[in-house]
Amino acid sequence: MKLLVTGAAGFIGSTYVRLVKDEHEVVVLDKLTYAGRRENLPDDVPLVVGAIEDPVVVREVMEGVDAVVNFAADSHVDRSIADQEAFARTHVIGTGNLLDAARELRVPRYLQVSTDEVYGSIASGSFTEKSPLDPSSPYSATKAAGDLLVSAHAHTYGIEAVICRGSNNYGPRQYPEKLIPLMILNALHGDSLPVYGDGRQVRNWLFVEDFCRGIHTVLERGRPGEAYNVGGPDECENLEVVSRIIELAGGDESLIEHVTDRPGHDRRYSLSSEKLRSELGWEAQVRFHEGLRRTVDWYRDNEDWWGPIRSGEYREYYEKHYGRALG
Ligand code: NAD
Ligand code: TYD
């Protein structure tokens, strides 16, 4: 297949491209926001720099492709709370533009990469694909709007579109605004570890390569018009995650600092992947303790990757958001 992969200069999309590029022809469209970097992509993969909401560039790059896989997003909940505008533009206008172009150009297959956060928070049990969408942050609300546009296009125009909803990902090349890479880099530097509120929130951790395998399985064999959950094998409270990072990266528990909680903070996410497992045979292969060890090792060995981030725009973001400078 010839694949158009959007947003693949970021964390998950670049992992996906590495997984599929030897078997498929890949072209990437990415706007290169603060989270997107050319060096995340293998050298032999062509990158077109542009936005998914741009009708002209999208039609140019989509001509002749067999499938579109849309990762493009603003992906951080805290930034969406500070300013939602880019989130709405990319997730709603951008997704709609990709779908319109896919319909006009008769692209045979479209996959929307989405998140468990569209279901909101769940106190016990796990969300299935039949659970109602009940998003609570501007990030998840705009992702849910994108999902609904995908379903509407499949229903109305018969586009062969599928949706993959992943739980919290972690692994190499994740921008260090997210919990796991932020805590790893701060622990390696002896900086304080800012835990929101009581730190008892629960996330369902999924190693990024497992998510990418799930996405590709659904692209190849998912039923058109359907959504598939891709959940991690382990659930953990944030404080437990931070303690394990301290064990692996060094430092001690006195680095933990409880800071003001995120407004509207979702308490627990949990996904059932039973549909994907029973229909398409996908299983997560990497347990959290193993994936976390691999992730800490990767950050320890790849200062070339994170050094420029920690000395750039990120420092200002960090200072503004946490009210203190990085050490
Ligand atoms: P990321 O922030 O690392 O990367 C996003 C990429 O999209 C960047 O390269 C950025 O430059 C690009 N982009 C942003 N706006 C764009 C636009 N308008 N046009 C073109 N490119 C644009 O994000 P990620 O963590 O790799 O997430 C990828 C996808 O997976 C997103 O759709 C996200 O909602 C979804 N997802 C993420 C997680 C997670 O834990 N990170 C979990 C489930 C689902
Ligand atoms: P995050 O990585 O932002 O992912 P999401 O909000 O999409 O789940 O956050 C994961 C969890 O970690 C979430 O409960 C918020 C919490 N958190 C902190 O306690 N401190 C931090 O500095 C960050 C970034 C997140």
Image: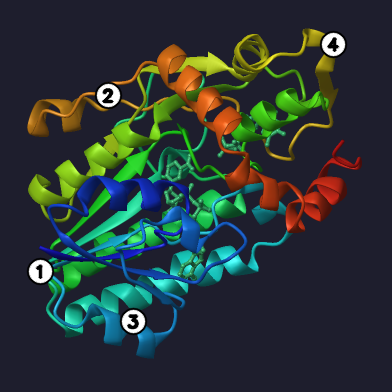
Three-letter code, disc 3: Val
Amino acid beneath label 1: Pro
Name the residue at 28% across, 85% down. 59
Nearer-N-terminus badge (4/1): 1
Of label 4 and label 2, which has the lower sequence position?
Answer: 4
Instruction: Using the image, tell me which numbered label, if any, was put on residue 176.
Output: none
Q: Amino acid at mark 2?
A: Ala
The residue wearing badge 2 is: 284
Crowd rating for badge 2 (residues with CA inside 10 Å; few <14, some 14–19, many 20+): some
Disc 4 to disc 2, C-alpha distance: 34 Å
The percent position of residue 235, horizontal first and vertical second, equals 46, 16
Reading the image, the residue beneath label 4 is 254
Q: Are marks 4 and 3 in contact (CB under 8 Å)?
A: no
Q: Secondary structure at mark 4?
A: helix
Q: Secondary structure at mark 1?
A: loop
For label 3, count other residues whose C-alpha is less than 10 Å away and answer few (under 14), some (14-19) or many (20+): many
* Front: mark 4 or 3: 4
Mark yes or no: residue 228 visible: no
Q: Residues within 10 Å of mark 4 (few under 14, many from 20)?
A: few
